[in-house]
Image (cartoon, rainbow, N blue to C red):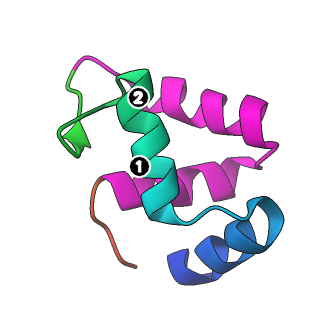
């Protein structure tokens, strides 16, 4: 499954776009002016996404990838 497929499924499930998640991550301190905060580990972000939005690991990693500006 491509990252875009994951993103589409996430939007259907949560109603949130990658930009929405970026804004929430900024509020939590996971991002620093839209780049990943170097002291934050991927596990912290994926755990937050799993716990707060009931995402699976692959879906959480797809959102994490958007934080790193990966498209595929």
- List x then y, in percent, for residue 52: 74, 33
How many numbered marks are there?
2
Q: Main secondary structure of the magenta part?
A: helix
Distance from label 1 to label 2 (Cα)?
9 Å
How far across and how far down the image is residue 56, in percent? 77, 49
Say which element carries label 2. Answer: helix
Q: Which residue is mark 2?
A: 27
Q: Residues within 10 Å of mark 2 (few under 14, many from 20)?
A: few
Q: Would you place residue 61 above or below residue 41 in this image?
A: below
- Relative to the observer, which residue lies in front, 72 or 36? 36
Quarter of the picture containing the N terminus is: bottom right
Is residue 70 found left or right of 19 in the rendered image? left
Residue under the image location 72 percent in, 65 percent down: 15
Residue receiving disc 1 = 22
Query: Dot 1 lies on which element?
Result: helix
Q: Residue at x 44, y 23 (%)?
A: 28
| 26 inside magenta stretch | no
Residue 54 forms part of the magenta stretch: yes
Q: Which residues are magenta?
A: 39-67
At horizontal 69% and vertical 47% (from top left) the residue drawn is 57
């Amino acid at each position: 499954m491509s990252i875009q497929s994951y993103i589409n499924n996430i939007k259907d499930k949560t109603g949130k776009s990658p930009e929405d998640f970026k804004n929430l991550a900024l509020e939590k301190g996971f991002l620093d002016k839209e780049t990943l905060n170097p002291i934050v580990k991927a596990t912290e972000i994926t755990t937050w996404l799993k716990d707060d939005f009931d995402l699976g690991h692959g879906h959480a990693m797809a959102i994490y990838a958007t934080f790193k500006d990966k498209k595929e």
